[in-house]
Amino acid sequence: MTSANARTVANVVLATAGVAAAYVIWTTPSLRRLALRGARLWLGASIPLYLATQTREAWAASDASARSAQGGRRS
C-alpha cells in the first residue's frame, strides 16, 4: 500500500467515525443537549474574545496611522 493510499484510507475511516458519532449524538436527546450546551458555551466565550481582540488591534492601528499622518506628533 502506498503512502497516498494509506492516507486516503485513514481519511475515509476518520470521516466515517465522525459521521457515526454525529448520528449517535443527534439521535440521543441527552447527548444532543450536552453537545448544544457545549457549543453555546464555546461560542459564548470565543466570539466576545475575538471581537475584543479585533477592537483592540483596530484601536492600536488607528492610533499608529494617526501618529504617522501627523508626522509622529500626538495631538
Image (cartoon, grey):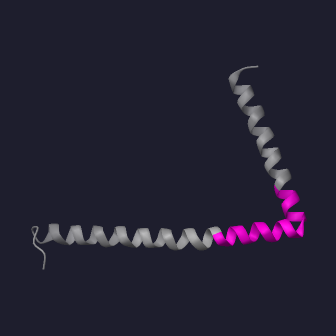
The residue lying furthest to the top in this view is 1
Question: Is residue 21 placed above or below 64 in the rendered structure?
Answer: above
Image x and y of residue 70, in percent: 11, 72
Residue 45 falls left or right of residue 23: left
Identify the residue at image location x=68%, y=72%. 40
Residue 11 falls left or right of residue 71: right
Give the residues drawn in magenta, as a range: 22-41
The residue lying furthest to the bottom in this view is 75
Image x and y of residue 22, in percent: 82, 57
Assign the magenta stretch its main secondary structure.
Answer: helix
Identify the residue at image location x=9%, y=68%. 71
Image x and y of residue 61, in percent: 29, 67
Please tell me which residue lies in front, 65 or 60. 60
Identify the residue at image location x=71%, y=31%. 7
For the C terminus, the quadrant is bottom left
For the N terminus, the quadrant is top right
Identify the residue at image location x=22%, y=68%. 65
The quadrant holding residue 31 is bottom right
- Is 36 colored magenta in this rendering? yes
Image x and y of residue 67, in percent: 16, 70
Question: Is residue 67 placed above or below 5 in the rendered structure?
Answer: below
The quadrant holding residue 23 is bottom right
- Is 38 colored magenta in this rendering? yes
Tally the marks: 0
